[in-house]
Image (cartoon, rainbow, N blue to C red):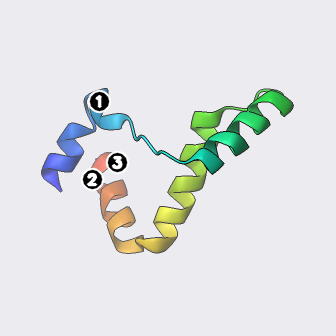
Amino acid sequence: MEQALAETRTREGRIVTVYSPRLTALFRYLDYTTPRFSVSNHAAKLLEEILAREYPQMWERIGECIAG
């Protein structure tokens, strides 16, 4: 856990790359058709919601570590 948290303090540690042609097509479409749509912000929000639901204890622990 400590190593994972330490790595988030670097730019490289904060970037998550996902390869999916379907996601790319969907997000590009939304980017073209939705004013002020942010692929990164929307993807992060969706992933956070899903991961918080799938791994609630770990998500809570990470939140506590990041908060202070």
Q: In what element is the residue under mark 1?
A: helix
CA–CA distance between discs 2 and 3? 6 Å
- In the image, is residue 30 above or below residue 47? above
Q: Name the amino acid, label 3.
A: Ala
- The residue identified by callout 1 is 12
Mark 1 or 3: the one toward you: 1
Left or right: 10 with respect to 18?
left
Q: Secondary structure at mark 2?
A: helix
Residue placed most toward the observer, 57 or 28: 28
Q: Which residue is mark 2?
A: 65
**Which structural element holds mark 3?**
helix
Q: Nearer the viewer's eye, disc 1 or disc 2?
A: 1
- Horizontal arrangement in the rendering, residue 31 relative to residue 8 (left or right): right
Query: Looking at the image, which residue is at 26% across and 33% down?
Result: 9
Q: Is residue 30 left or right of residue 19?
A: right
Q: Which residue is mark 3?
A: 67
Q: Which residue occupies the extreme left position in the image?
A: 3
**Inter-mark Cα distance, 1 to 2:** 19 Å
| Placement of 21 over or under 51, stated as above or below | above
